[in-house]
């Protein structure tokens, strides 16, 4: 979890510096780690919520890069994760 959080924060810093390529790489690594955490403990609502936030960050990055269909897909996934949290 700490490693995923570190990648998330790195992505935030890189995005603030307008380094979209670097930020995307950091967020993609975070997303993979968060997926693994959810797979290891699917009943953990906190992990699922963190996965939704990771998706939202990728969506925001895609919006800034003008990649609207990808942004929409990430937002849709984030919404599904949040729905799952609310159903638990």
Image (tube, rainbow, N blue to C red):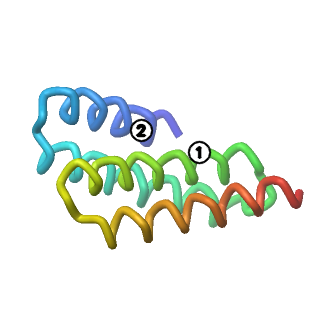
In the rendered view, does 3 fall on the left or right side of 25?
right
Where is residue 3 drawn, in percent x and y?
41, 38
- Name the residue tied to disc 1: 50
Label 2 crowd (10 A; few <14 / some 14-19 / many >=20): few
Q: Tag count in the figure?
A: 2
Where is residue 12 drawn, in percent x and y?
30, 32
Question: What element does badge 2 sit on?
Answer: helix
Disc 1 versus disc 2: nearer the observer: 1
Q: Residue at x 59, y 45 (%)?
A: 50
**In the image, is residue 77 above or below residue 22?**
below
Sooner in the amino-acid sequence: mark 1 or mark 2: 2
Q: Quadrant of the C terminus?
A: bottom right
Q: Residue at x 47, y 55 (%)?
A: 55
**In the image, is residue 14 above or below residue 78?**
above
Give the quarter of the image for residue 78.
Answer: bottom right
What label does residue 3 carry, if any? 2
Where is residue 61 drawn, in percent x and y?
28, 49
In the rendered view, does 86 fall on the left or right side of 77?
right
Q: Residue at x 15, y 46 (%)?
A: 20
Question: What element does badge 1 sit on?
Answer: helix
What label does residue 37 carry, if any? none
Give the quarter of the image for residue 4.
Answer: top left
Disc 1 to disc 2, C-alpha distance: 13 Å
Foreground: 77 or 11? 77
Q: Kindly indicate whether the residue at mark 2 contacts the one at mark 1 (C-beta within 8 angstroms).
A: no
């Amino acid at each position: 979890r700490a490693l995923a959080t570190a990648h998330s924060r790195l992505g935030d810093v890189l995005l603030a510096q307008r380094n979209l390529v670097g930020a995307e790489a950091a967020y993609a690594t975070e997303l993979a780690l968060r997926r693994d955490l959810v797979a290891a403990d699917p009943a953990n609502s906190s992990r699922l919520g963190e996965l939704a936030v990771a998706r939202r960050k990728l969506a925001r990055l895609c919006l800034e890069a003008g990649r609207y269909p990808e942004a929409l897909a990430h937002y849709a996934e984030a919404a599904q994760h949040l729905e799952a949290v609310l159903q638990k």
